[in-house]
Amino acid sequence: MSIKNVMVIGAGQMGAGIAQVCAQSGFEVLLHDMNEEALQKGLKNIEKLLARNVEKGKMSAEDKSVTMNRLSPSSDLKDAAACDLVIEAVVENMDVKTNIFRELDQYAPKHAILASNTSSLPITEIAAATDRPDQVIGMHFMNPVPIMKLVEIIRGLQTSEETYESIKAMTDELNKTPVEVKDFPGFVSNRILMPMINEAIYTVYEGVASPEDVDRVMKLGMNHPMGPLTLADFIGLDTCLYIMEVLHEGFGDSKYRPCPLLRQYVKAGWLGKKSGRGFYQYN
Ligand code: NAI
């Protein structure tokens, strides 16, 4: 199946990035958010990033305007009627996602593939909310999307070979590297990354070291490009907590229990970089 028109649902840090790379690769893109302010902010961020690429000589001014012209805002999920592929990137919450997929299933054309950028939630369960479970798949981009090369492609139990092949080919067109993963909690990336971040939060919670020192140990000692707490702030502490909860529930193993300090920060609205405060403060 050839994909030309793409709709991205959620104009947050991931959705805006996905919309940007799709538009840069020649796809016509509708960017949707239920929040008009978030939608405008998402589009503005894309424009800013492209302008920076032009300044650095990585992109011509003409390519920038061609890319921007391929992007259109959408305030109505019914716009999915014009799309071959919908990529959902809203908050990491099963009820919110299944409601969206149920609606999309009504509006999107019969041939359309419905993908989720979920970090950890079961694709099999999201797919079961639709009448086209064979055309539902996970497309897990990494943050920041324009820079990171990997896309984990998650096959739900019902995902067809045709759907998988179309999404694999589309990922190649985005100039990203697809890696096939089965549908188990956290897939591969977050099953390994999140327990490390959670453990880093425990070391702060137990007073073993300050956030700065925890990050310093992992950067200088393990050669990680970014410390785990800086990374957690960057991902969003709410998203980190959701993923730990999915691992904890999905495997039923206490080794995945979310650190109480992580819960407390999320309750305080300290969500990391996006809210101005997490383990660090941001202007
Ligand atoms: P975000 O909080 O930056 O953006 C989410 C956006 O979705 C917001 O603009 C919000 O207004 C919108 N939204 C919420 N409910 C909606 C609805 N019912 N209809 C339309 N729009 C709605 O979140 P972020 O970080 O972009 O994460 C989105 C998804 O991507 C999550 O599933 C997350 O797990 C996944 N993800 C996140 C990564 C990260 O590093 N933050 C990395 C890879 C995947």
Image: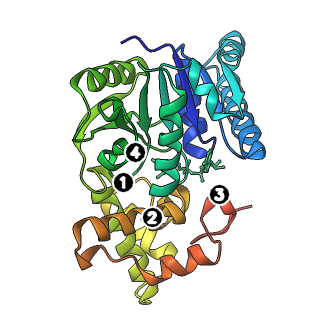
Residue at mark 1: C-beta within 8 A of ligand 1:
yes
**Three-letter code for the amino acid on which mark 3 is drawn:** Lys
Q: Which secondary structure lies at badge 4? A: loop
* Whole-percent x, y for residue 27 in the image: 54, 16
Mark 2 element type: helix
Mark 2, Cα crowd under 10 Å, few <14 / some 14-19 / many 20+, is many
Q: Is mark 3 within 8 Å of ligand 1?
A: yes
Residue 228 sits in which quadrant? bottom left
Mark 4 Cα-neighbour bin, 10 Å: few <14, some 14–19, many ≥20 = some
Amino acid type at mark 4: Ala
* Dot label at residue 120: 1
Single out the mark in the foreground, 4 or 2.
4
Residue appearing at x 75%, y 35% in the figure: 44
Mark 2 or mark 1: whose residue is earlier in sequence: 1
Classify 2 as above or below 254.
Answer: above
Q: Nearer the viewer, mark 1 or mark 4?
A: 4
Q: Which mark is residue 129?
A: 4
In this image, 88 relative to 171: left or right?
right
Q: Nearer the viewer, residue 147 or 27?
A: 27
Q: Which residue is labeled 3 in the image?
A: 274
Q: How many marks?
A: 4
Q: Are marks 2 and 1 in contact (CB under 8 Å)?
A: yes
Where is mark 2, residue-wise?
242
Where in the figure is residue 254, as x and y percent of width and height? Answer: 25, 79
